[in-house]
Image (cartoon, rainbow, N blue to C red):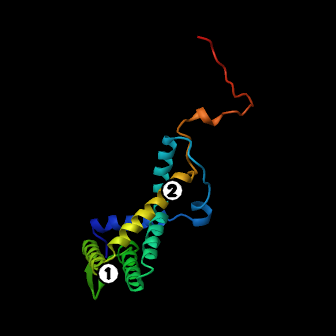
Amino acid sequence: MTPDAGATNTYSTTAEIRHAIRPWFDDFLTSFTLPLSFPELSLRFQKNLYTFRGNYAIISLLIFILTLILRPIAAIVFLFIIVGWIFLFFARDEPLIVFDFEFGDRLVLISLIVITIVAVAVAGVWWNIFLSIVIAGLLVSLHAILRTPDDTESPYGALLSGVDEDGDSQGAYMQV
């Protein structure tokens, strides 16, 4: 069975998400420096948000589960919901078929959204969601700003690349 046009987008997104998770110790937790300027900060933020989006999603979900540490039943319920999202929506390469009935991606998405909203309302974890968004946002922003992207040049180009290579930092000046 071939997926319809709407499902093709989901399946290509699935492959992108799988490949978006970068190695934790070799790539994610290396090469930290302070940015020299606001344009460099902005460039780092944009590049790192795109490069490490999978890692940031995992960190955000872990922070949410950790905010539920004092509510173990809610933590277990949301772990199941997260696993449901991963296996029923993000990690599928083929349409969902149960008892020879094919469920479309839209129906699966709407079902997962409704289940998640009902679980949040019943468990009353609105404050935990807010707190986890704030903490994850701060940690993600801090990492995205401080990590030096591997393939980036300085936004100043050659202005900063050859500074003090020959020991003469004076430069050639002309009188006006």
Q: Which mark is residue 132?
A: none
Q: What kind of element bears circle 1?
A: helix
**Picture coordinates of residue 117, whole percent (x, y):** 27, 75
Mark 1 — residue? Answer: 123
Instruction: Decide which of tag 1 and tag 2 comes sooner along the chain.
Output: 1
Q: From the viewer's perspective, is residue 18 above or below residue 98?
A: above
Which amino acid lies under the numbered mark 2 shown in the image of this protein?
Leu
Q: Quick one: which residue is furthest to the top in this view?
A: 176
- Horizontal side of 164 relative to 3 (left or right) equals right
Which residue is found at the position 35% from the left and 74% from the top? 89
Which residue is found at the position 66% from the left and 33% from the top? 163
Q: Nearer the viewer, residue 151 or 39?
A: 39
- Horizontal side of 174 relative to 77 (left or right) equals right
Which amino acid lies under the numbered mark 1 shown in the image of this protein?
Ala
Q: Quadrant of the C terminus?
A: top right
Q: Quick one: which residue is furthest to the bottom in this view?
A: 99
**Picture coordinates of residue 122, whole percent (x, y):** 28, 81
Q: Residues within 10 Å of mark 2 (few under 14, many from 20)?
A: few
State which quadrant residue 126 falls in: bottom left
Q: Nearer the viewer, residue 40 or 67?
A: 67
**Picture coordinates of residue 30, whole percent (x, y):** 62, 58
Q: From the viewer's perspective, is residue 141 above or below residue 123?
A: above
- How far, Cα to Cα, is label 1 from label 2? 31 Å
Q: Nearer the viewer, residue 81 or 93?
A: 81
Mark 2 — residue? Answer: 142
Q: What kind of element bears circle 2?
A: helix
Q: Nearer the viewer, residue 18 or 122?
A: 122
Q: Residues within 10 Å of mark 1 (few under 14, many from 20)?
A: some
Q: From the viewer's perspective, is residue 125 above or below residue 176?
A: below
